[in-house]
Image (cartoon, rainbow, N blue to C red):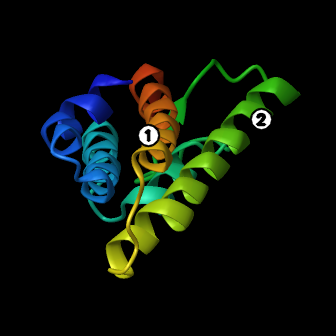
Amino acid sequence: MHPWVWGSVQGLWSSGYFREAVSVAARAINAQSQAKLARRDVGEGILLSDAFSPSAPIRGHPRLRLTADDGGETFKNRHNGAAAVARGLYSAIRNPLAHEHDIELEGNEALEYLAAFSILARWVEQSTVGNAP
C-alpha cells in the first residue's frame, strides 16, 4: 500500500474500523493532491479529474503529468484513465461512505478499496505538476 493510504489508516484498520479507514485514506489523498496542486477551491474527484486532464494547463488549473505530453494516444489514454479512476473512486466509494451512514464494510472489501485508492495515491505522488505559462 502507498504510504499516504496505509500510513493514514493503520490504527483504524487494526481496530477493525474498516469503513472509517477507507474514508480517511480518501481524505488523505485529497489533502495531498490539494497541497501538490496548490488548489483548495475544489477537491476529490473534481480536482483530480481536472488535474489529470490531457489538455494543456490553464491559469488556476495546473495539471498532473504521469508522462511528458508527446501528443500521442498513450499520453491521452493514461491521463483520461487516471481522471476517470479518480472520479469513480470518489463518486462510487468515498461519497457513499461519507453520506450513507448505514454502510458497513467487511475487511476484504475495505482492503480492495484501499488498494484502489493506493493506486491513485501513487499516480498523484509520481506525477509532475504542469502550470500554465
Query: How far from the left and from the top, in percent, is residue 110?
Result: 42, 48
The answer to whether residue 28 is left or right of residue 62 is left
Q: Nearer the viewer, residue 80 or 41?
A: 80
Distance between the Cα atoms at labels 2 and 1? 30 Å
Query: How far from the left and from the top, in percent, is residue 4?
Result: 28, 31
Disc number lying in front (2 or 1): 1
Local crowd size for mark 1, using a 10 Å CA cut-off: few (<14), some (14–19), many (≥20): some
Visible in this render: residue 10? yes
In terms of image quadrants, where is residue 82? top right
Visible in this render: residue 132? no
Residue at the image position 51 percent from the left and 41 percent from the top = 112
- Give the mark nearer the N terminus: 2 vs 1: 2
Tell me the residue that label 1 is attached to.
111
Residue 60 numbered tag:
none
Q: Is 112 rendered above or below residue 74?
A: below
Q: Amino acid at mark 1?
A: Leu
The answer to whether residue 12 is left or right of residue 93 is left
Q: Is 120 rendered above or below residue 39?
A: above
Q: Nearer the viewer, residue 84 or 55?
A: 84
Residue at the image position 23 percent from the left and 53 percent from the top = 17
Residue at the image position 31 percent from the left and 57 percent from the top = 23
Name the image quarter holding the N terminus.
top left
Query: How far from the left and from the top, in percent, is residue 8?
Result: 19, 38
Secondary structure type for disc 2: helix
Tell me the residue that label 2 is attached to.
76
Q: Amino acid at mark 2?
A: Lys
Q: Is 27 rendered above or below residue 72?
A: below
Local crowd size for mark 2, using a 10 Å CA cut-off: few (<14), some (14–19), many (≥20): some
Q: Furthest-right residue in view?
A: 73
